Amino acid sequence: MHLTAIVAHPDDAEIFCGGTLAKHADRGDDVTIVYMTRGEYGGFDTTETEVAATRETEAEAAAETLGAEAEFLDFEDGRITYSMENRLQLVDVLREHRPDIVLTHFGDDMHPDHRTTSQLVSDAYYMCSLPLLKTEAKPWEPQNVYYFGKPTSSFEPEMYIDIGDYQSTKEEAILKHESQVEWLKEHGGIDAEFDGLIEDTRAEARVLGRTRGVKFAEGFVPLHKSATEFLS
């Protein structure tokens, strides 16, 4: 199985689905994290170029910790826009990686980059299997898209992954984003929900886990819902 997480910024995958990605990688699945931007707005008293270089290095280290491959697109932090050109670029990303499962942001999110990424990925998923849509790569149809979201949005998980054995790996990957641990601690404001990054993500995973009888969990909303043969 191949999973591809398409996220707006370095650290998004690690925070929202890092345990799930690590668990799949440990099972032997291929895992790729595609970062739309290099998060170049996430810094103080420096330049966008310097922040981007730092965050790319951190993201590569974090992805390696999770057992994933990292890829960077060239969208600009805070300036991801919706257009047909950008949608077709995401179509090619899906066709090139040929994932069975796609993970991305839930549509209701305060951050405009998260919202736009969600829409671009969802629409690219719809189009990437169309045989008459010609792009650089051949058509491909992933099995499903799974959305992750923030507790401060209308996001309500519909399925849960037990990450009890992988919470520590998730936290180790988050800590690779050293610049952001400090940035979120000092920045506050709109990102105040993550000002204690490790503590807050651990608490969220613990709350989700308790609702499902496990120590830690991550929650998702699938694009396609499926029926089961029996109650279990």
Image: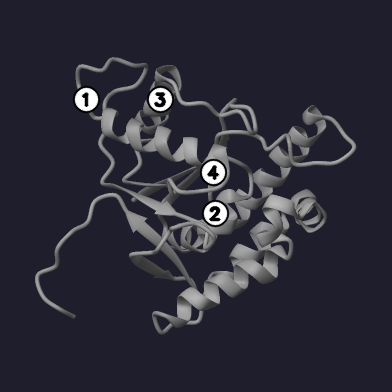
Residue at the disc numbered 4: 69
> Residue 39, image x and y in percent?
68, 38
Q: On the rendered structure, is 95 left or right of 66?
A: left
Q: Give the mark nearest the N terminus, 4 or 1.
A: 4
Residue placed at 52% from the left, 42% from the top? Answer: 114
Q: CA distance from mark 3 to mark 4?
A: 22 Å
Q: Give the mark nearest the N terminus, 3 or 2.
A: 2
Query: The C terminus is located in which quarter?
Result: bottom left
Residue placed at 40% from the left, 52% from the top? Answer: 147
Residue at the disc numbered 2: 67
Check residue 87 in the rendering and tell me which mark sits there, or answer none: 3
Residue placed at 50% from the left, 81% from the top? Answer: 215
Secondary element at image label 3: helix
Q: Residues within 10 Å of mark 1 (few under 14, many from 20)?
A: few
Closer to the eye: label 1 or 2:
1
Q: Is residue 223 above or below residue 142?
A: below
Secondary element at image label 4: strand
Q: Give the mark nearest the N terminus, 1 or 2.
A: 2
Question: What amino acid type should be assigned to the residue bearing mark 2?
Answer: Gly
Question: What amino acid type should be assigned to the residue bearing mark 3?
Answer: Arg
Residue at the disc numbered 1: 130
Question: What amino acid type should be assigned to the residue bearing mark 1?
Answer: Leu
Residue 182 shows in the view: yes
Closer to the eye: label 3 or 1:
3
Outermost right residue: 45
Q: Residues within 10 Å of mark 4 (few under 14, many from 20)?
A: some
Closer to the eye: label 4 or 1:
1
Question: What amino acid type should be assigned to the residue bearing mark 4?
Answer: Glu
Closer to the eye: label 3 or 4:
3
Residue placed at 87% from the left, 34% from the top? Answer: 46
